Image: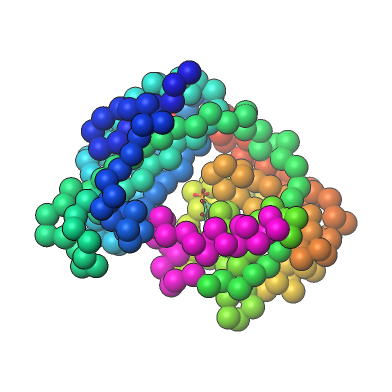
Amino acid sequence: MTRIAYVNGRYVPHGQAAVHVEDRGYQFSDGVYEVIAVHRGRLVDEHGHLDRLERSLGELRIAPPMTRRALRVVIGEVVRRNRLGHDGMIYLQVTRGVAPRDHAFPDAADSALVVTARRLPPFDAAAATGVDVITIPDIRWERRDIKSISLLPNVLGKQQAQDAGAYEAWMVDGEGQVTEGTLSNAWIVTAEGELVTRHADRAILSGITRRAVLELARGEGIGFVERPFTVDEAKAAREAFLTGTTVLVKPVLHIDGQAVGDGRAGPLTGKLAAFYAAHMKTQGESP
Ligand SMILES: Cc1ncc(COP(=O)(O)O)c(C=O)c1O
């Protein structure tokens, strides 16, 4: 089946989808993106993703390419044309548009929108297998709350993890506190049993999955604290896990080669993963 992409007003075969060489995303990383999971043909937490997209655009003073209502129609059309009746993901990128290369904002450029789709094996958060993480210095800029397409430190970090035989790299700030993973948020259950994830300020991306898991925990009466935690605290934790749109809720078994707890997926992680799996089934929104 031919994959179809939306590029600036046109639905085109994926293989022919292209943007101009002077697109500011290509030249300056001057743009933002979102990834939305599709589960059983339905978008997961669509509104949360579109709210965050609008926020990212606003922070960078990039004009929304179209109204939210129109954007939802485009996303729905991409889902339909790619026959994403089961599981997959939508990638959505907005840049400041095409203009002669100059650092300052162009006087007149329409922001550019690309939407692509990809089929994926069925999501099953409840059956997630555990992964290992390494820790690396966080060398990113100070506005990690903006979902910018400028991802070089994340790319390098993920590759470093892969080279070390791990799945993810947890980035660590100057105070020895874990900020987040290269494509996921970081969580621990401390030695005392406290569920902890870093508070969402400018130092991390406010993950939509992170927020959903916090709300599920709240709904189930599971206490949690949003605060920084150190690498040492994480290594001494009972449990650790990651959250993200496509990683779902993934147990962390080792940090820098050191077992977390008994080195197996922890019970609270398992519970939260099961809640999230149910959330994906019931909260998905029709495009
Ligand atoms: C740096 C970073 N942190 C966290 C996340 C998780 O965010 P979400 O749950 O919205 O996918 C991502 C997702 O891509 C990410 O790139």
In this rendering, the answer to whether 70 lies above or below 245 is above
Q: What stretch is highlighted in magenta?
A: 140-163
Residue 241 on image: x %, y %: 69, 54
In front: 227, or 218?
227
Residue 68 on image: x %, y %: 27, 39
* Occupied quadrant, residue 57: bottom left
Residue at the right extreme of this rendering: 262
Task: Give me the residue at 58% from left, 80% from top.
Answer: 174
In front: 275, or 79?
79
In front: 238, or 136?
136
In this rendering, the answer to whether 261 lies above or below 71 is below
Q: Name the quarter where the C terminus is drawn.
A: top left
* Occupied quadrant, residue 178: bottom right
Residue 269 on image: x %, y %: 72, 49
Q: In this view, does 125 lie to the left or right of 281?
A: right
Residue at the left extreme of this rendering: 107
Task: Give me the residue at 68% from left, 67% from top.
Answer: 135
Residue 153 on image: x %, y %: 52, 65
In this rendering, the answer to whether 189 lies above or below 20 is below
Task: Give me the residue at 39% from left, 49% from top.
Answer: 33
Q: In this view, does 111 lie to the left or right of 142?
A: left
Residue 229 in view of the camera: no
Task: Give me the residue at 43% from left, 40% from top.
Answer: 91
